[in-house]
Amino acid sequence: MGRASAGPATWLPVTSTALISTRHEYGWVFGIYVPIAAGVFAVVCVVVLGAVLRYRRRSPVDASRVSERNGLEAGYAALLTATVAFLLYVTFTAEHRVDTVSLRQTPALTVNVIAAKWEWEFQYPRYGIVHRSGAVGRQPLVVPANRAVRFNLSSEDVIHAFWVPELQFKRDAIPGKTQEVVLAFTRLGLFRAQCAEFCGLRHSEMVFNVRVLSPAQFARWAASRGRAAL
Amino acid sequence: MAVQAPAAPLPRVRGAGWIGALTSTDHKRIGLNLGLCSLAFFLLGGVFALIMRSQLASPNAHVVSDYTYSELFTMHGSTMIYLFVTPMAIAMALYLVPLQIGALRVAGPRCALCGFWIWLFGGLTMQSGWLAADGAGRDGWFSYVPLSNSANTPGVGQDLWTLGVILAAVGMTIMGACVVATIARHRAPGMALLRMPVFTWTALVAVLMVVGSFPVLVVAMTLLYIERTTGANIYTGFSGAIDYQNLFWFFGHPVVYVMFFPYLGAAAEAIAVNAHRRWFGYKAFVISIMLFAALSMSVWAHHMFTTGGSTNEYFAFTSTALAVPAGIEYFDMAGTLIGGSIVLRCSMLFGLTFFVQFLIGGVTGIFVASPVLDYQANDSYMVIAHFHYTLFAGSVFGFFAGVYHWFPKITGAFLRERLGKVQLAIMIVGTNLTFFPMFILGQEGMTRRIARYPQHPGWETLNRLETIGAGLIAVGIAVFLVNVWVSLRRREPAGADPWLGHTLEWATASPPPPLNFETPLPPIRSYAPLFDLHEEAMDRAREGVSA
């Protein structure tokens, strides 16, 4: 799942990294869930196919009359329970970091994200910069890489959702309350993002781009009050 | 032990022909009417899907406007959930449960008839939105506030949608309550709870969830209707939006299992009969579906992981724990196959496909039950793929397993096996071609409910594959309709018990007479009373040979 989570370290929660990356946490959980799911699917396919081929066209007289194996089934249920416990351990570990520990980081930058039908407004209060995207424009959300960025998400009308697939993360913007999330981008570049919650007629157009700059480039861009070339 | 009510009013047929058929209080007629109407709504919802897939065949198509597209996805979801998969599950329960438990009638036959008509008027009310000046409902099948209030979605279409949902839910609650009461009061002598057939158990937990959760939908929608029409401030601000979602999903998740259990039961009956074995691990199965139902009443807010207004750990815990009862069902399915004498009729093949394909929906359900993974998957095509694998690749295949299994009972004639296998093959290809690419699109960031999508590498190809798949599904359904037509026109008569059935519905004529059973019931000593007789007959034959 990308650079941030490559290598054997994917299999352990990396608690030493100061910066919490949703992309990294997602990759860790994904890397455990998906192989287990694929394994379960493969086993069931083999069992069904094997049983059908083996027990096809026998005389009904030869059919087994054993109708339960409760000991075996209880052992199997215990195995299922243990698997569920393991999956929950993985999920809770990652979820705690994404939802709780991340908020304890000191953000290097705060961006107010205001969603409205059908546009995004990105305010940088410290630098006096305002960018707008969606049905009204194509100014990207600009952020520095490898820095904790706080987003204050709010909506002016209906429920929207701030979804950046590069971050493997989204959070709803619901009118009446500003939600705080602290996120970190780990790769430089231009990424697509958009509103994920259906918000009316022009929902398809409520898109924006994210431009991730190196911290030095970002500092230059911010110092020029957004006038420096991206 | 429930005793047969001695002075049950006869299910009279009021007059002949259409009037008689539409006002009959015979549970079989009501079930059949409900099933046929649901099937008509299924075809309508399928047409909506085909138009949407045509729009999405290329990134910036203009088959329909954005406005029409929002009506189409709203009415597709609403039609399929409120008017097809859920009522079809109740229709199967209404038709089969009294037969399977040896009852002469359903409890509260007039109530059940009334419930059917209320549901039907709800469906027609919802669809009548297409005739309104501003069109049909257009805020999605869950119509979140504040988008669905009168300020953001003015007009009659959304009002009709809201009223239609209320009526459909009331009607289904009444019919569900009738099935619960039938099981409580009308079981034949000897039919203890732990001798009820597998399908009856799955139907029972489903209708219990209907009775427990559908009234909450009625409340949520009534409040929405009041807010829309009077301007009352009911769902206001952040907490109002979250309240609506809690109320909605308190219905909206249990209904997912109402749309699953009876089809699981149908597939299980078909597999057991075609493997010539009684369903394996019956007691564990009964415990597991009760645990399943109890848990699934407490998982609703996993739809709300990204709102910042739910207790994510709790709902991740209950949702992931569903893997335990679900795993038991697969164990019992495998246990039934292993050691059996398997005949690969259409009902068996559809039943096995139900289990295999549903598993893709199941494991991805555990995937999205993890908040960290859902933060990416929520509202993306990943979720669309997941629930279509449960509802279409799962439940609809389970439904067809039931159709091929019980069609001879209902009509007295067999469906054609060869046409059935053609239908199955086309539908397997079509289903996976339609829904599997959606996992990839969702992972790559395609959001749901968009009429046009970015020109991202590969997206157009994947979307076009899906559109072709949807066309194949339509062909498969057409083959099924032809099969029904041919089988009813040139009948191959089926006797009372063409498959060596296990349960009491096979102990009466096909189709069953108005009061279900004209001859005394066989002794009920297990959950497969007819299979007990088959086994005894086989034993006698073997002894005769050895003697």
Image (cartoon, rainbow, N blue to C red):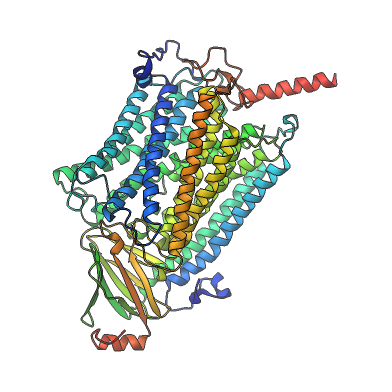
Q: Position of residue B110 (x, y in %)?
A: 35, 20
Q: Residue at x 72, y 34 (%)?
A: A64
* Visible residue check, residue B283: no
Q: Is residue B169 above or below residue A162?
A: above
Between B54 and A192, the one nearer to me in the picture = B54
Q: Residue at x 52, y 51 (%)?
A: B432
Q: Is residue A174 above or below residue B485?
A: below
Between B230 and B382, the one nearer to me in the picture = B382
Going by the image, does B274 lie left or right of B38? Answer: right
Q: Quadrant of the C terminus of chain A?
A: bottom left
Q: Quadrant of residue A57?
A: top right
Q: Is residue B45 above or below residue B382?
A: above
Q: Quadrant of residue B179?
A: top left
Q: Position of residue B143 (x, y in %)?
A: 29, 49
Q: Position of residue B10 (x, y in %)?
A: 41, 12
Going by the image, does A118 lie left or right of A91? Answer: left
Going by the image, does B114 lie left or right of B329? Answer: left
Q: Position of residue B482 (x, y in %)?
A: 50, 34
Tell me how many marks there are: 0
Q: Residue at x 52, y 37 (%)?
A: B400
Q: Quadrant of residue B346?
A: top right
